[in-house]
Image (cartoon, rainbow, N blue to C red):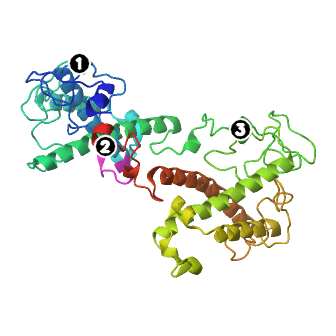
C-alpha cells in the first residue's frame, strides 16, 4: 500500500508538533498545520524490513508530546537492555579482580552470572545503584537538562534520547548528519533486539538456573522430562517386533513379550533437545514393520535432501568444464542453479536420471538386497538404511559400535535438517527466481515491494 496506508495501519497519521513520524490522529486527512509533519519513510525507527512498526496501534491517538516520551523511553530501555545483555556475556569471560565488598569479604569472582547475582549484592550496593540511577535521571546524564519526575525524561521535550554528550560511546559527538542518522537508526534497531534478547536470557536463566542455562537443567520442561514421559507424550509405547524405539500403543503399560522393546533414550533418532519426536502420534499404533519402513524412508529422504542441499550450494562456486550434452551444444556452465536447471535438462537426461534411481532401488544400492516394489525398501526388513556398503562415504564401514551409532545419529539429525533446508531453498528459489534468491527480487512480497509499497 502507499506509505500513508502502511503507517496508518500501524496507527500512524500526522503528529501534531512536527515529530515527522506520521500522523497519529487515526484518520487519513492531511493536516496543513505547520506543526504537523507529513508521513515519511526516512524517519528514525522506520527501517526495513518492517517499516513503521506499531501493530497494536498504541500511537493511534498519540500527540507529539506522548510520542516523544515513548520514543525517549524506547531508546532508554534499549540502551539499558544493551548494557544488560553485555552484562550477561562479559562475566562469563572476565571478572574484575579483588573485592566487590571488602567489609563483607565478597570478591567479584564470588558473584555468579545472571539473576543469581541479585542475591549477592549487599544492601548498601542496592542504595548505590538506586542513587546512581537517580543521579543520571536527575541530571539528564550530566547534561544539565533536568527532567526527573513521574513519567518524565530530560530529552522528551527536544530530541528524544539526545543528552548532548555523545552517548553511548563518550568518544565525542557525530557531526555528519547522514552518519548520525545511520548510527541513531542502528542504536534503535540494536536496542530493540537487546530488549528481546535480555528477556530471553531472563527466561532461560530463570528456568534453567544458569545465566547461559543448559536446558537439560530445566527439569520441568516437557522436552526435559524423563525419557518415558517424553517418548509417551510423543505417542510412543512398545514396538511389536523389538525395534527398541519405544512403545507405540499410546499407553504406559510395559509389554513383557519378547518381541516388544522397552522405551529407551539410547535408540537411534532419540536425541537432544527433542528426544523422541512424533508430535502428531503417527506411530501411536504402528507395528515393527511399519516403523522400519518409516525409518528407512526417513533416512532415504534425509540422504537425498543432503545431496540436494549440496547440489544447490556447489554450483554457485564450481561447475564441471565442458559439455553436459555435446549433441545439443549444452555446457555445464550454461545450466543455472536451483529450480531453473530443470528446464535445461534434455529429455534423454531425465531417462538417465530415472534409470539410475531404478538401478539404486532395484539393486539395494548394489548390495544384492533387492527391495524394489510399491512402498518397499531393501533395508526395511533388517536395519533401516543399512545397505552394508558404508554409505554415505563409500570409504568403508565403521566397525566401532559407539562410533557407528554416533555417526548414524548424526546422519539422521543432518538429514532432518537438510529436509527442512531444501524445502526452504525451494520456496526461496520459487519466490525470488534465483537459487540463492535475493529477496529483493520477490516483487510480490509485502516486505520487498517498492519503498512506498513496503511502508
Where does the N terminus fall, quadrant-wise? Answer: top left
Q: Would you say the residues marked 3 and 1 are in contact, meaning their CB atoms lie under 8 Å apart?
A: no
Q: Where is residue 335 shown, x and y percent of the image?
A: 51, 69
Left or right of 337, for residue 381: right
**Marks 3/1: CA distance?**
51 Å
Return the residue at label 2: 450
Give, as a single range, the part of the protein colored magenta. 89-99
Does dot 2 land on a helix, a strand or a loop? loop
Return the residue at label 3: 234
Would residue 117 be seen by someone viewing this image from the given angle?
no
Label 1 Cα neighbours within 10 Å, binned few <14 / some 14-19 / many ≥20 = many
Q: Would you say the residues marked 2 and 3 are in contact, meaning their CB atoms lie under 8 Å apart?
A: no
Q: Where is residue 144 shown, x and y percent of the image?
A: 6, 31
Of the numbered discs 1 and 2, the one sitting upstream in the chain is: 1
Return the residue at label 1: 25
Of the numbered discs 3 and 1, the one sitting upstream in the chain is: 1
Does dot 3 land on a helix, a strand or a loop? loop
Q: Nearer the viewer, mark 3 or mark 1?
A: 1
Amino acid at each position: 500500500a502507499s506509505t500513508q496506508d502502511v503507517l496508518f495501519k500501524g496507527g500512524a497519521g500526522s503528529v501534531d508538533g512536527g515529530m515527522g513520524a506520521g500522523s497519529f490522529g487515526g484518520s487519513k486527512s492531511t493536516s496543513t498545520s505547520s506543526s504537523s509533519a507529513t508521513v515519511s519513510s526516512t524517519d528514525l525507527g522506520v527501517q526495513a524490513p518492517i517499516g513503521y512498526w506499531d501493530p497494536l496501534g498504541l500511537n493511534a491517538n498519540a500527540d507529539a508530546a506522548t510520542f516523544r516520551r515513548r520514543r525517549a523511553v524506547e531508546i532508554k530501555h534499549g540502551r539499558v537492555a544493551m548494557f544488560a545483555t553485555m552484562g550477561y556475556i562479559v562475566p562469563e569471560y572476565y571478572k574484575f579482580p579483588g573485592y566487590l565488598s571488602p567489609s563483607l569479604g565478597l570478591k567479584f569472582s564470588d558473584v555468579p552470572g545472571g539473576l543469581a547475582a541479585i542475591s549477592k549484592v549487599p544492601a548498601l550496593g542496592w542504595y548505590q545503584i538506586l542513587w546512581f540511577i537517580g543521579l543520571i535521571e536527575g541530571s539528564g546524564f550530566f547534561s544539565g537538562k533536568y527532567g526527573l519526575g513521574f513519567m518524565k525524561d530530560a530529552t522528551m521535550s527536544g530530541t528524544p534520547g539526545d543528552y548532548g554528550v555523545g552517548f553511548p560511546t563518550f568518544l565525542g559527538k557525530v557531526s555528519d548528519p547522514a552518519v548520525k542518522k545511520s548510527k541513531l537508526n542502528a542504536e534503535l534497531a540494536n536496542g530493540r533486539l537487546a530488549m528481546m534478547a535480555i528477556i530471553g536470557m531472563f527466561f532461560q536463566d530463570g528456568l534453567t538456573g544458569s545465566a547461559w542455562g543448559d536446558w537439560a537443567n530445566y527439569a520441568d520442561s516437557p522436552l526435559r522430562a524423563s525419557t518415558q514421559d517424553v517418548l509417551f507424550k510423543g505417542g510412543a509405547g512398545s514396538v511389536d517386533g523389538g525395534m527398541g524405539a519405544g512403545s507405540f500403543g499410546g499407553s504406559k503399560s510395559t509389554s513383557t513379550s519378547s518381541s516388544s522393546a522397552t522405551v529407551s533414550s539410547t535408540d537411534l533418532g532419540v536425541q537432544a533437545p527433542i528426544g523422541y519426536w512424533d508430535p502428531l502420534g503417527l506411530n501411536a499404533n504402528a507395528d515393527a514393520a511399519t516403523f522400519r519402513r518409516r525409518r528407512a524412508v526417513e533416512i532415504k529422504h534425509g540422504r537425498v535432501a543432503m545431496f540436494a542441499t549440496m547440489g544447490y550450494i556447489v554450483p554457485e562456486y564450481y561447475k564441471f568444464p565442458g559439455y553436459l550434452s555435446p549433441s545439443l551444444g549444452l555446457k555445464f556452465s550454461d545450466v543455472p542453479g536451483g529450480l531453473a536447471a530443470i528446464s535445461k535438462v534434455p529429455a534423454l537426461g531425465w531417462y538417465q536420471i530415472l534409470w539410475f534411481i531404478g538401478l539404486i532401488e532395484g539393486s539395494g544400492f548394489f548390495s544384492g538386497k533387492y527391495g524394489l516394489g510399491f512402498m518397499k525398501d531393501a533395508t526395511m526388513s533388517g536395519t533401516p538404511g543399512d545397505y552394508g556398503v558404508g554409505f554415505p562415504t563409500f570409504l568403508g564401514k565403521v566397525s566401532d559400535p559407539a562410533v557407528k551409532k554416533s555417526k548414524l545419529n548424526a546422519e539422521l539429525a543432518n538429514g532432518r535438517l537438510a529436509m527442512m533446508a531444501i524445502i526452504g531453498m525451494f520456496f526461496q528459489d520459487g519466490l525470488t527466481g534465483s537459487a540463492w534468491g535475493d529477496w529483493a527480487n520477490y516483487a510480490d512480497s509485502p516486505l520487498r515491494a517498492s519503498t512506498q509499497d513496503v511502508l
